[in-house]
Amino acid sequence: MKFLDEAVIECRSGAGGAGCVSFRREKYVEYGGPDGGNGGKGGDVWIECAENLNTLIDYRYTQLFKAPTGGHGMGRNRTGAAGKDLVLYVPPGTEVIDEESEGLVVDMVKHGQRHLLLPGGRGGRGNASYKSSTNQAPREFTPGVPAREMRVRLRLKILADVGLLGLPNAGKSTFVGKVSRAKPKVADYAFTTLHPALGFVRRDSTEFLVADLPGLIEGAADGHGLGHRFLKHVSRCAAVLHLIDITQPEPWKAYKTIRKELKIYDEDYEGDLSDLPEIVALTKADLMLDEEAEVILKEFAKKTKTKPVLMSVHDGRGVDDTVGKLAELVADRRTVALDEGEEADEV
């Protein structure tokens, strides 16, 4: 399945049906009164969060969605049929943004959550509703309320617990494949990962999702490379795992590059990516001698004021410890969220 995390669509509710002008015509009834029915209500446009979806690919080739118009009123006081509601299904984590005002309409985060985007137009009145003691044969009627339109941007932010950060070819996909059953593409060249991939990890009593995101490069927050398109997915994570290739010259520069991009992104989009709990791991430790790795580890800590984990996915060194620390961060985040939810319910 192809992954699409952003789409722009146009929605249109159904117009109300027009009222009817009609008079009763029967044998032996010389002066039949008005019997024109009202028009039916137009269909609403709803957006609903569906648990079984994980991409916006359904909105890649179809951009216009219209709810049916209400049926017109008919004689014999028959009301037009109401237009069927249109429901747009989106995956959890989808933000709906008004393209005109650029304001957030709704954030779809929970399975089954529904939101009314556009109400259908009210049906028009038939001439029977205009009958009065002074107007026994009215010919007035009203058309239905016109349809309403709205252009929205659907922006998906993956609801993963842990996001993987790092420069291209840092070993992110290899790590996900090691700790989960996910099978992301792994190769010895940059930008192997072109779309986010999710891996389900189980550690003791804690289960969490890990998002393998395309590698970042310098200038990613300004739109360079592929990673800038996926930085938004990190914002919902409980923690980030920053993977750095220890075999590259001066690996601390790679760490500073990514941290710089996160801060720039936060300033531009008012986010808090740079403040998320972080675990730093120096990967591919099996490709050098233990003595050399320890020297780089100490130099890295000195340069960045951060204590990294030495890790090798191939021989398993540091993997279990890293997964354990991630599980603790995720569990702490869920505990805080649960407490906040209980406090909100009490209020």
Image (cartoon, rainbow, N blue to C red):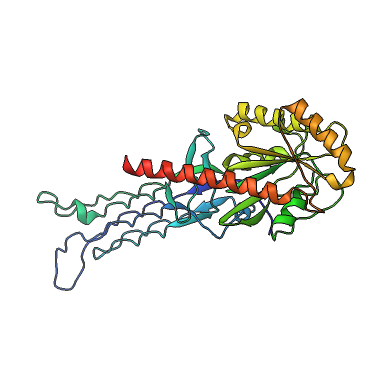
**Snapshot quadrant of residue 221:** top right
Res. 247 visible in picture = no
Coordinates of residue 170 in the picture (x, y in percent)? 80, 43
Q: From the viewer's perspective, is residue 65 above or below residue 27?
A: above
Place residue 295 in its image quadrant: top right
Would you identify the image quadrant in which residue 243 lies?
top right
Residue 176 position in % (x across, y down): 72, 53
Identity of the residue drawn at 41% across and 44% down: 341
User: Is any part of residue 299 visible from this angle?
Assistant: yes
Q: Is residue 94 left or right of residue 136?
A: right
Residue extending farthest to the front is 291
| Residue name at image x 79 percent, y 51 percent | 313
Residue 6 position (above or below residue 201): above
Residue 287 picture location, percent across and down: 89, 46
Q: Quick one: quadrant of the N terminus? A: bottom right
Image mark count: 0
Near-viewer residue (192 or 137): 192
Taking depth in this image into account, of 235 and 86 the one nearest to the observer is: 235
Q: Quadrant of the C terminus?
A: top left
Residue found at x 83% / y 37%: 294
Q: Residue furthest bottom?
A: 27
Residue at the (60%, 36%) spot, across then down: 276
Q: Is residue 18 left or right of residue 48?
A: left
Q: Position of residue 20 (x, y in %)?
A: 29, 57
| Front-lying residue, 33 or 89 | 89
